[in-house]
Image: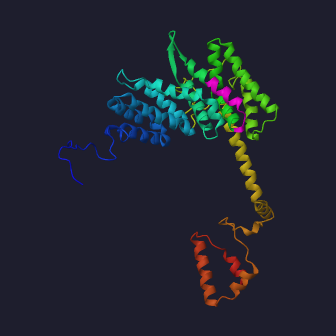
Amino acid sequence: MALDPEAEEFVPGRMWGVDSNPEYTEEQPFVVLLKDVLYMLSTNPEAFFDYMSTVTDAMNDAIEVETQLESVADVIFEQSILEPNFTYTGAKMCHYLFNNLKLPKNIRAFRSMINQRVKDVVISRNELLENPETVGTVHGTSFFLAELFLMIEILKDGKQCKVQAYRGGLQELMEALVSHPNTANAKCLAKLLKMVGAAIDEFDKERQDGEASKQIAKIIDKVKQHLADGCQFDKSVNYMWLNLLELRASNWGLGSGEAKSNPVTAGGDAPFSNGPVFYDAEGKVIPEVDLDFEAQYAEQQLESDFQDFIAENDEIDELENDFSELEIPAEEFDEQEQYLAPPMGGAAKNDVESLDPEVEQALEEFLQESKNKGTYGYSSRYWSSAS
């Protein structure tokens, strides 16, 4: 094949397999750091502010374009909705970043990015619930949104209040869950209402929104109807709903007063109290009603364990009977030393009688010497009686 000397000069472009924009071929260092922080917080949540301060400083220094911040929103949101034990921490991270990210003004706010991801799930909630592979996305998003609703407040009309959009999103998700009755959805809805029901009622009362309160009542009425119609829920879920209905009837366990929701914020500011405040493994304040339940349960468990121990150790009764039948004659005590001197049985007497005379005499002298020195031993009268 002949080469054309008039052909245009060949200029190599780029190597095969190399992205034309190498800046984004690998994860950004701050994203790698963020993932490390997610792992560390799952094992060491008490160091939250130390870790978050470090990763936030790294983001403030490195993020220059909106796509970089989008990757941060993706990582936190996905971890929060897919890992149940991380939902609270994920919402707490979002709250912290809402207040501490200092990025160029041309970049959309991080709050808006998180809200958009929640909104996307709310919009497609029914389709997601009909697909067994995506049901978990709706459940996880529901709990994540509930944490945001409990945790985040904004300034409106000169006072702090919860976010109405979060309240509306929760309503849409709860209605979708009750419209797709099965064990998983009923369990999710029960846990969701137990978690956020008191705060929703308080929020609706403060806004004097009677219509919203009626919507919650309609959801609960639908669940009652499902139970009455014999929906095939697990027995544990049925009991869960019965307990929830009793809890709501008692004003969510808060007594006759108005519901007060003052959750621990990302700053760690709990309501002031002269009494002790207890926290669970996720860092949430444990209500007194739950503490009473746990104490009663622990007491019942101890009693049950003791009964099991007695049942498995019947020989204890036999030992007690053996000791009760044992009688120790008064003459078995040495009057000088007041120590128990066991009587010499027949076998022991035979052993003494079989001793060599010299050995017996040496033993008798040793015992007598020990007694004179205050050393405790058998009384010599037993040996004399045997000789």
Residue 49 pos. (x, y %): 43, 33
Q: Say how the picture is coloured.
A: rainbow
Q: Quadrant of residue 262?
A: top right
Q: Tell me if I can see residue 282 in this picture.
A: no
Residue placed at 37% from the left, 34% from the top? 54
Q: Is residue 263 left or right of residue 291?
A: left
Viewer-nearest residue: 345 or 268: 268
Can you say which quadrant of the picture contains the C terminus?
Answer: bottom right
Viewer-nearest residue: 186 or 15: 15
Viewer-nearest residue: 344 or 182: 182
Residue placed at 65% from the left, 13% from the top? 209
Q: Which residues are magenta?
A: 170-183
Residue 273 pos. (x, y %): 56, 24
Report the residue that reaches farthest toward the top.
157
Label the magenta part by its dominant secondary structure.
Answer: helix
Q: Is residue 25 left or right of residue 125?
A: left
Residue 288 pos. (x, y %): 64, 30
330 magenta-colored: no
Residue 355 pos. (x, y %): 66, 88
Residue placed at 69% from the left, 84% from the top? 352
